[in-house]
Image (tube, grey):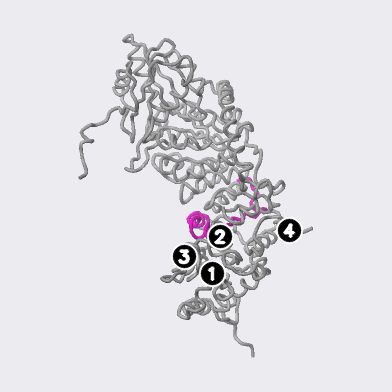
Amino acid sequence: MSDNLFVAGHTACSGCGQSLAARLVLDAAGKNTIIVNNTGCLEVFSTAYPESAWTVPWIHSLFENAAAVASGVEAGLKYLGKKDTINVIAQGGDGSTADIGLQALSGMLERGHDILYVCYDNEAYMNTGVQRSGLTPFDTNTTTSPAGSKSSGNVRPKKPMPEIAAAHGIPYVATASAGIPQDITRKVKKALSIKGPKYMQIHVPCPLGWRYGPEQTSAVGKLAVETGLYPLIEIEFGKISAVRQIQPKPVEEYLKVQGRFKHLLNNPEEIKKIQAIADYNIDKYGLKAQAEG
Amino acid sequence: MKQFIEGSHAIAEIVKLCRPGVVSAYPITPQTHIVEDLAQMVANGELPAQCVNVESEHSAASVVLGGVAAGVRSYTATSSQGLFYMQEVIFNIAGLRLPLVLTCANRAISAPINIWNDQQDSVSLRDAGWIQLYAEDVQEAVDLHVLGYRISEDKSMMLPVMACMDGFILTHGIETVDIPSQEQVDKFLPPYKALYKLDVDNPITMGPLVGPDYYMETRYAIQKTLEEALEFIPKVMEEFTKVFGRNYSLIEGYQIKDAERVIVAMGSVCGTIKDVVDELRLKGKKVGLLKITSYRPFPAQAIYEALKGIPKVAVLDRAVSLGSYAPLAAEIKAAFFGKKKAPQVISSFIAGLGGRDITKDSIKEIYRLLTSKELQGEFIDLKPELLKEKYE
């Protein structure tokens, strides 16, 4: 019998990085937490009526309004004088965060609500069948950015959501990865110890959409971090306060284990472009660990 | 206490007296004075609510949804495009069975953009599962808010209420209004006690995924509740009369007992029609008015009873269903289908779109056109010279 607040029995795919991360987020937050969820995989696989995987109060309204509904919940709790003892977490996938829900999220951040917003970033609209989102990486093969004789997949890099969130001048922004569970727990606890709006973006590998074996979720997540393609950073009041340092691996190691990048493997020019994105991140955030001695 | 007061200020006063804990709105003409007043009341410490200034109407509706879900009485107001931008949240609030009062300052829909009054905005959302009540004057608008919270929050209802008042005509009109005392409102409207809410001591899942095995029953349940509301709302209105002394009903007949010609209408135009009825009655014409206060639930049986003996009925719509029958006219006619008794004629008129004044002459024209020849969607006060332009 598990003590988890997000309980087993839901219908997520085998190897789902999002279900793993959602459990870690809630367990770190504890039972005095109210969750507001956007529409998406997590909402669908955890609440198929008459069952629910949530043992804390949880509400889903629409695809794009979790940040706004959470703002109302927080305002209500403030009115009742209960906000100081209850965490409010708004959460959703990358599409509901970076695309259709960006306005509501920006409003929530700008107004200063005491809410932690968590974006589970699996880099495409997985719930509807792997369509590209604003957080789909460059050159990814998705169903709406397919690779073909005249295309190598998604034409744009990921929207810089952590920087966009940080630009609101909020106290805490962090990225994390389902491949590094303890780091998620630490960052959620840290976020919830701070008053005001917080934004966390967790990289959550998706076996179905990324096309790798479900047993590799943790390894794939780690490779994204270790190549510099998914920098793990913390930003406090607009300034980078911590980064997770790496011994950078070539991006090919990350790309070759996923079907969504398979079309690139005989295309060194495209791989060079992706390596350049990783190198930019490594340089920008100072990710490269100095050799000891 | 009676005050000579602008409609919007009166609404802000009554909302304050209803003691909401969360107020959220986005500015749109002609709703703005209401929420500006509420913001000032919060700033002055007169209203101990959380005032959430959002970035859109979609978020305004979402914030009050969240507020009620947390167990706190909430309030929002909007108009026109703002109501349309709220639309999916509007359906969602009813689907989640959350009680709320929203003021709709009725305004035309773009394009072309037009800030003036008609009722296309709320009428277009008639299928959302909300109770929709239309005010004839500012006093009614004020009272419908108190009634609205009481009806909405009753455990037999748990559906949101849209209090509709004609933009500018009522929101910016200055009238003598009896603003109730806090004691009166408190007596009629107890503090909100949620049947269900987001509570860490009693966690529930709200808004789950519901498949074909369960979805239909959720819609059926709302439909049944709205049917029951036809019995429930008049009871609450009777209680209202005991506390406040003013009478309300789902529909109101004015001079219809012996009337030969009756206009059916909603909203502020009913005041104009009453004036015309008085004038024509002095001349011996047997005319009358049937005012529809409750558009949702639609009181078809009460309308049938009120109009079944009237020879000629005109339905005045301040909205259109482009490509079909006018919305209110279609439903009035439906109320008589298959019945033994019915008016000989039910003619349909469209007037006052985009703020075009419906004058006493407009109303007289409708009575004049209400003959034994049935008219279908006849536009009143059209300017034929504007229809001559061609784009070639």
Q: Disc 2 or 4, which lies upstream in sequence?
A: 4
Judging depth in this view, the residue of B162 and B92 nearest the camera is B92
Residue A145 badge: 3
Q: Chain of mark 1?
A: A
Q: Disc 2 or 1, which lies upstream in sequence?
A: 2
Name the residue that disc number 4 marks: A4
Residue A56 badge: none
Name the residue that disc number 1 marks: A260
Going by the picture, which residue comes out furthest to the front? A149
Tell me the SS state at disc 4. Answer: loop
Rounded to the nearest angstrom, the CA distance separating label 2 from label 3 is 13 Å
Query: Does residue A118 appear left or right of residue A146 in this picture?
Result: right
In front: label 4 or label 3:
3
Residues at circles 2 and 4 in contact by the CB criterion of under 8 Å: no
2 and 3 marks on the same chain = yes
B208 shown above or below A200: above
In front: label 4 or label 1:
1
Tell me the SS state at disc 1. Answer: helix
Residues at circles 2 and 1 in contact by the CB criterion of under 8 Å: no
2 and 1 marks on the same chain = yes
Amino acid at the residue labelled 1:
Arg
Residue A126 badge: 2
Amino acid at the residue labelled 2:
Met
Rounded to the nearest angstrom, the CA distance separating label 2 from label 1 is 13 Å
- The magenta stretch spans which residues? A79-108
Does the rendering let one see residue B248? Answer: no
Q: Disc 1 or 3, which lies upstream in sequence?
A: 3
Residue A106 in the magenta stretch? The answer is: yes
Q: Chain of mark 3?
A: A
Amino acid at the residue labelled 4:
Asn
2 and 4 marks on the same chain = yes
